Amino acid sequence: MEETESVGFNKRRAEGLDKSDRPKKVLPLKDRKLNPANTICYLQIMGTGMDTQDTSPSVLLFFDKQRFIFNAGEGLQRFCTEHKIKLSKIDHVFLSRVCSETAGGIPGLLLTLAGMGEEGMSVNVWGPSDFKYLVDAMRSFIPKAAMVHTHSFGPSPGSDGVSIPNPLMFTDLIVLIDDEVVKISAILLRPNSSEASQLNDENRPSLNARELDLEERRDQFSEALLPRSQNNEFDLAVKPGDISVIYVCELPEIMGKFDPKKAAALGLRPGPKYRDLQLGNSVKSDRQNIMVHPSDVLGPSIPGPIVLIVDCQTSSHLQELLSSQSLSNYYGDTSGNPPETSKTVNCIVHLSPASVTNTNDYQKWMTRFPGAQHIMAGHEKKNIEVPILKASARIAARLNYLCPKFFPAPGFWSSPHLNGSVPCALSEGPASKLCESISAENLLKFHLRPYAQLGLDRSGVPSTISSSEIIDDLLSEIPEIEAAAQQVTRFWHGDKQAKEDLIPMPNNNFMIEEPWLNVSTLPSCLEDISREDMEIVLLGTGSSQPSKYRNVSSIFINLFSKGSLLLDCGEGTLGQLKRRFGIEGADDAVRGLRCIWISHIHADHHTGLARILTLRRDLLKGVPHEPLLVIGPRQLKRFLDAYQILEDLDMQFLDCRHTTEASLEAFDSTNDTSPSESPTNTENNMNQDLKSTLFAGGIPMQSHWKRSDSTVNNNMVSSIIRNLKKVLTEAGLETVMSFPVVHCPQAFGVALKATDRINAVGKVVPGWKIVYSGDSRPCPELIKASHGATVLIHEVSFHMALYIFAVFTWHCAFLVQHDRHINHYVIEQNCR
C-alpha cells in the first residue's frame, strides 16, 4: 500500500502537483547567509571535453555557501554524476554565449533540480541576449517544479519583441552581482564582420509564415545591433548567439592582521568589539571618548583575488577585445609591475579556441596581465586521448576486448595519430609562448581563499588511463576472459566447434539466439547483406537521466555511402558519436545525416538536437546542401523556433503526424488526383481520412489528437513530404512511418523499411525493416507496426518488481511478447 501511494505521488509530482493535488508554489530565489570573513573559495574546471571537443567547458566558482557555474554545455549533468559534484548547490549559471554549445546542458540541469526535495530547487540563469523565450519554450518538456529565473544583460526586447541594444552596453562594465562575498561583472564582445556565423542565402531552407517572422526578428536584431558600415549597409551576419562575454569575478579585499596592542593603546578591552573591528565596523573606545576605526588597529589589507573568464571565439571578437577600454583598470604596465591604480588579476580562464589564442595579437594581449595564471580551456589538440567519462570508457574498453565486432574501441583510443606526447596547442601556431599558461584539465582548481593557498591545485585531477592498462586490469581480475574472447572471435568467424560449444544444454541457464547458429535461419531480407549495408549503433540507453555508464536515448542508423539517420537525439548525442567514431569520424557522420526523427517531447529524447544541427551547419558552410529534415512532435517545433532566433539550425521541420500511414496514404492519393478533381476537396478528404484513422482506439493518452486543431494543412507540408520521399530514395529507404504509442501526448514510434533489392542471380530480396518504439506501454499500434520487422528496438525502463511504477509513468517493465509478429531480432534498451 505504501509503495502504491509513493507511485501515485510521483505521478502527481511529474504533473507539477503537490501531495494534495494542488499546483506547486512558485519557488523563491535561494537566500543563503553569507560569511565573507571565513570563506573557502576556488575556481574549478569541469568537463573540458578533451576526448570529444563537442561542447564548451564549464567553470565552477565555489564558495562554502554559494556556487556559480559559467557555461552549461551538454554532458554537464553526467560529468557531475560521475565525479559526485552536487548540482543542488548551484545558485547561478552564467553563459558566455547563448547557443547550443554553452547552454545545451541547461534542460538536464533544470530537470535534475526539479526532482530535488519536495518542491524542487530554483536557479538563476544569466546571458548576454534575451533568451527568456528559449527557457519558456523549454517549459513544454520541463516540469513546473523546475523554476528558473532568467536575467538578460544584453540587448533588451522592445515592445514589438525585437531586441534593441544600448550602445553603451558594449563599452561599459556591467555589474551583475555585488555582495559581501563576490562582485561579478560582464563585458560584452560583439563581432562586426562577415566572419560571424551565417548561412549562405542559397542554402537557407524555404520558410513558412511562422518561420519568416522568426527570420525577420533575427534580421531586425542584427540591424539594431550593428553600426552602419562605410557603404551605409548593415552587416547582417550577427545573431543574438554571436555576442560573447568576458566575466570579471572580484573577491573583496582581505582585511589586514588585527593588532591587539594598538587596540589596547586606544582604550579597547578584549571582547566583541575586537571582532567588529575585524569585520570592518568602527567602535567606541572603552576608556577614551573616541571612535576607533578598523584602519587604526589593522595592518595593511590585501587586495581581493580577481579572475577573468574570457570567451573570444573569432578574430572579429578579438578585435573588439583589443579595442575595449573596460579592462584598462586590470592591465599592468609593460615592466611587469602593475601601477598603484590598477587591479591585479590572479587567474584568467580562456574559453577561446586555439585558432584565436595562438595568434600574436592574443598572445600579446595576455602579457598585459603580469603575474596572472592563464588556464587554456578552449578546444585544443592536447590530451584528446584522455576520456572525460572514465567509467564509461573503462566499460567500453573491456567489452571491446571481449567482442570487438559488437563493441568497437572508443574513437579517442582508435585514432591512429594519437601518441603519448602531443605538443601543447600554444606552441603549434606562429606565435611563441609569451606568458605563463597551462592547458586545462578536468577538476583542476585555482584556490582563491584562504589567501595562503592562492594558486593551482592538481590534487583532484583524475589520473590518466589507457586501453592497455584497462585490459591488464581486466585479465588480472578475470583471467578466464582471455579464453572467452578467443572463443567469441572463432564463433564470429564461423568456427563450427565454437558454435557447438555455445549451444545451450538442457537445464542450462546460458542462452543464445538461434539465428546466430545457422545461416539458413536468417530472414530473407538479410540474404547476401554486406557489412556496409546497414549498422545500428545504440548511442544511449540511459532512461530519463544519464548515468555513470549510460547516456540518454539516441540510435544512429548508419547506411554508410547512402548517409545516416538518428532516431531520437538526447543530450550528449554528439559526444557519444565522437566517442564511437572519433572526432573526424563523427564529423563525417554528422555531414552524412539524411534525417533526424524524434519520438516525443521529453527532454531525454531531443535536447541534443540543436548541437547536432549547429555542427552540421558549420561543417557544410560554403558547400551546397539541403537543410536537414527533422521529424518530430508538434511541441518540438516551438522549442526549435526559439533556438533559431539565437542561431541558425539549417533544418526543415515535419510533424510526426504527417508521416503516419494514414497521412502518407492521403498525401499519395492527393498527388494522384485527376486534374478535374478540386484540390480543396482533395485536401478535405486527406484531413478526414487522417482524423478517422489516427488513434481510432481512443486511448486516454491519445485524446489530444481529437481536438479540432489537429488537422493536416496539406499546403504547408506537401513540399516537405516530397523532400522526405527524395531523401528516402537517396538513402535506399522505402518509407519512414510514424505510429502513435501510449506514453505522453504526441508520442510516436517509427518503422524504417529499406527498398527491395535484386541479388546476383536476379532474385528480388525484400528490404529489411527496423521498428523503434520510443517510450511506450504495450499497445496495438506497436504490435501492428512490428509485423514483418527484422529488428525491434524497445525501451524497457523498469524491472518487473517496479511494474506498477512503469504503468503509472507509461513505460514498460518487461519485454513485449509478440514474437509471432517479428521475424527475428529484438533489442531491449534495458535502462535500469
Image (cartoon, rainbow, N blue to C red):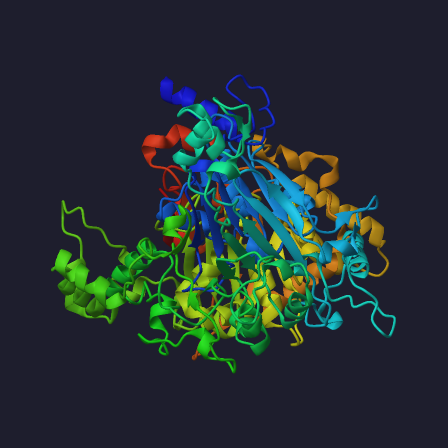
Q: Is residue 138 left or right of residue 564?
A: right
**Residue at the spot x=71%, y=54% of the render?**
172
Q: Is residue 661 left or right of residue 6?
A: right
**Residue at the spot x=55%, y=50% of the render?**
249
Does residue 643 lie above or below 312 as drawn?
Answer: above
Position of residue 669 measured from the top left corner of the image (x, y, whole percent): 72, 56
Let me know if residue 592 appears in the view. no
Position of residue 400 measured from the top left corner of the image (x, y, whole percent): 28, 64
Does residue 2 lie above or below 547 as drawn?
Answer: above
Does residue 617 lie above or below 129 as drawn?
Answer: below
Does residue 816 lie above or below 574 as drawn?
Answer: above
* Residue found farthest to the bottom: 430
**Residue at the spot x=31%, y=61% of the render?**
521
Please state, as top left, top right, bottom left or bottom right, where the N terminus lies in the image.
top left
Q: Is residue 707 left or right of residue 473?
A: right
Position of residue 716 measured from the top left corner of the image (x, y, whole percent): 76, 54
Quarter location, residue 425: bottom left
Judge by depth and name the residue closer to the eye, 414 or 88: 88
Judge by depth and name the residue closer to the eye, 305 or 383: 305
**Residue at the spot x=24%, y=65% of the render?**
401
Q: Is residue 815 left or right of residue 629?
A: left
Please state, as top left, top right, bottom left or bottom right, where the C terminus lies in the image.
top left
Judge by depth and name the residue closer to the eye, 705 or 540: 540
Let me know if residue 351 appears in the view. yes
Quarter location, residue 27: top right
Judge by depth and name the residue closer to the eye, 588 or 302: 302
